[in-house]
Amino acid sequence: MKLEIDTPLALETLLAEGAPLLSDVVFQGLDLRPHSARLCKVFLKGCVFLGCQVDCDLAGHLTQQGCLFYPPVPDKVYNPFRTGLYSVEELYDTFDPEAHDLEASYRSTSDFKIYSSYRLVDDPGGRLRPVLVDETLARRIHDNSISDALDEFLENFAHRSVVAVMGGHAVARNDKLFGDIARLTRSLRRKGFLPASGGGPGLMEATNLGAYLAPYPDDALERSLEILESAPTFRSGGVWLAKAFQVRHLYPYREGGESLGIPTWFYGHEPANLFASHIAKYFENSWREEGLLALATGGILFAPGGAGTVQEIFQDACQNYYTTYGVKSPMVFYPRQYWDGPEAVFPVYPVMEKLASRGNFSHLLAISDDLTEIERLLEADPG
């Protein structure tokens, strides 16, 4: 296993040991120029330097030692060599919820600038920007850095603690389902689970909102829903964000309100919601989607959604069928009339039953019209 050094404190601790040889160490996103003299005296075996700032002497030493060195990438609106997940404050750094032109304020943010570097945002088809290989590599490094930071974040949570909710991005804030999902994830967070979502609007926002307000009294959620309802969908533009900021101002983040959002700039026209405490935002949707399903070892609730949700159902079923990541996890569907029966919108549940029977995960499959029962199902250890 390689040792990762990605903070100044970790670097100082390592160098203070005074070892004459460093083997299989990955240095990431650090300014190594103040430490050049010390590092030039160390033998470096199999070490990797990603996005680190070095002087000429250290650059020559790294070359002589045969190290892999990928220098910082200049002139990017994002840092490919991140050492942590995103926060709301970072993505929406310049957004002013009281601005006269809320849309213009949103377009000034880091989140929108990164989105604009990825897609032709004002193009009717929202096409991807044509890029050269250097940009492609930078994006892949960025996404790998996000995955690494995500793994480190999840080390703080027990096995089976992550429960994800999959559902429609277009579900409005004033829809009863939105409030119901928020109440569910609030309860799950209070019981120690880490709710996770795709990080966007609709039921993804409801998932993160419930967890965010878990440390507050129950009436905080009802008050928040009243505020949010005046901008029901993300298509409301900047006002959708402004109302979320209003809730955050009224109820500042507290410990115990943790949740995970995993959005993507591939769907950047759907802004990341403001209630995930930790945001793992990717360029590549396929990388993000596969990872979100895999990390939800505590189970996934599939709520009403469209093609994206149906795709996620079959993708998760495939992970369970082949035990792709070494564990099978619960798949719970809500409500029954949406997923099962002759009048179902998407009657996929009978197919899931057949797959589960063949793939030996029938005991992990459930469907219900009762969110209280669903909560009990997710709490139960499937064995």
Image: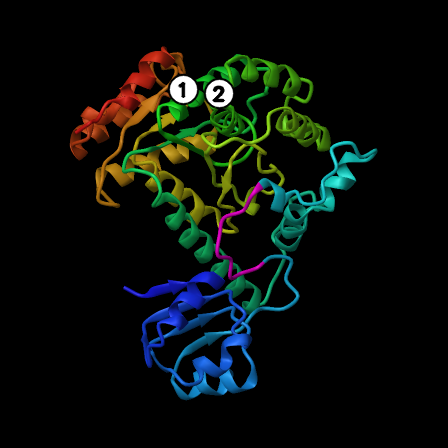
Which residue appears at 46% of the width and 61% of the height?
9
Amino acid bearing label 1? Ser
Spot occupied by residue 360 in the image (x, y as percentages of width and height): 16, 32
Q: Could you tell me which quadrant the C terminus lies in?
A: top left
Alpha carbon of mark 2 to alpha carbon of mark 1: how far? 9 Å
Taking the image as shown, residue 169 lies to the left or right of residue 342, namely right
Q: Which mark is residue 187?
A: 1
User: Tag 2, which secondary structure?
Assistant: helix
Q: Is residue 82 magenta?
A: yes
The residue segment tinted magenta is: 79-87
- The mark nearer the N terminus, 2 or 1, is 2
> Can residue 225 be found in the magenta stretch?
no
Magenta region, main secondary structure: loop
Q: Which residue is mark 2?
A: 182
Q: Position of residue 353 (x, y in %)?
A: 23, 24
Horizontal and vertical percent for residue 320?
25, 37
Q: Residues within 10 Å of mark 2 (few under 14, many from 20)?
A: many
| Relative depth, front residue between 151 and 350 | 151
Tag in front: 2 or 1? 1
Q: Secondary structure at mark 1?
A: helix
Relative to 302, is 102 above or below?
Answer: below
